[in-house]
Amino acid sequence: MTQPLLAIENLKVAYGPTEVLHGVSLDVKPGEIVTLIGSNGAGKTTLLKSLFGAPRARDGRVIFRGEDITEVPTHRVARRGLSLVPEGRHIFPAMSVVENLKMGLTSRPNPTGVDEDLATIFKLFPRLEERKLQRAGTLSGGEQQMLAIGRSLMAKPELLLLDEPSLGLAPLVVKAIFETLKKVAGQGMTIFLVEQNANQALRLADRAYVLTNGRITLTGQGLELLANKDVQKAYLGGH
């Protein structure tokens, strides 16, 4: 069996006295798209943030490439090969598209071949090339999401983490974003996707987990969970 690229083992995370994650375990193997779905407040964003040690785990372990990174300082985790596309995008509005993309270089140990990498991003997102000198704050929501993904890819991560990439976007834009993620995965990128849009996320995923009130309650292949009546009722409006 292939060793997981990322393994989360019995992770417990709290804000002060309030425990949010109650012993979560999951893994992501190289080349997979793994999705974590759950309702608002289930602890999905907390799980992603805890991989970077903010907040720090109360118990359990985070293993990346066979190495325990649970206690690694936050600023060093990204340099290990993880890159997060955060919820809300967090682009730099006063900077140009190209300047935003180059911010992804800060977590690369050896930022060479920048022009080639920019060309790759522009091939994925032609809209960004059209607007490369434009201030990022003037982009549409969908274009800003493309920019946030492009910035993370400029870091050349081994594992791309995405937190609610469909949030606040029109359905056609969401479809385009997910098609691009499928293309990125087809080029060999491993993806861990946290998402409320269960329909799109489960169609994209090789495997998926359901997080309910800080606990993993279901796991299986993406299409298997898409057909699950409990999942349909809870997340897809089924009856």
Image (cartoon, rainbow, N blue to C red):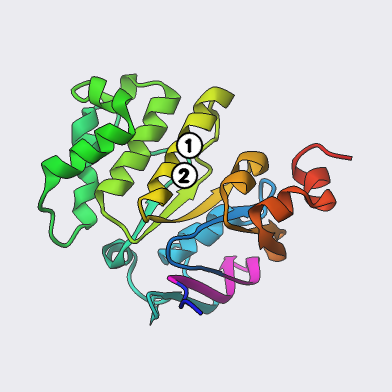
User: Going by the image, does 231 lie left or right of 160?
Assistant: right
Q: Residue at x 50, y 26 (%)?
A: 173
Q: Is residue 86 above or below residue 10?
A: above
Q: CA distance from mark 2 to mark 1?
A: 5 Å
Q: Amino acid at mark 2?
A: Lys
In the foreground, 169 or 200: 200
Q: Position of residue 96 (x, y in %)?
A: 21, 28
The residue drawn where x is 45% and y is 65% is: 51
- Please tell me how many numbered marks the rendered image carries: 2
Rendered position, 102 above or below 194: above
Q: Is residue 170 in view from this perspective?
A: no
The question of residue 183 being in magenta is answered with no
Q: Secondary structure at mark 2?
A: helix
Q: Can residue 15 be found in the magenta stretch?
A: yes
**Element marked by disc 1:** helix
Image location (x, y in percent) of residue 68: 40, 80
Q: Which residue is mark 1?
A: 179
Q: Residue at x 15, y 42 (%)?
A: 116
The residue labelled by disc 2 is 182
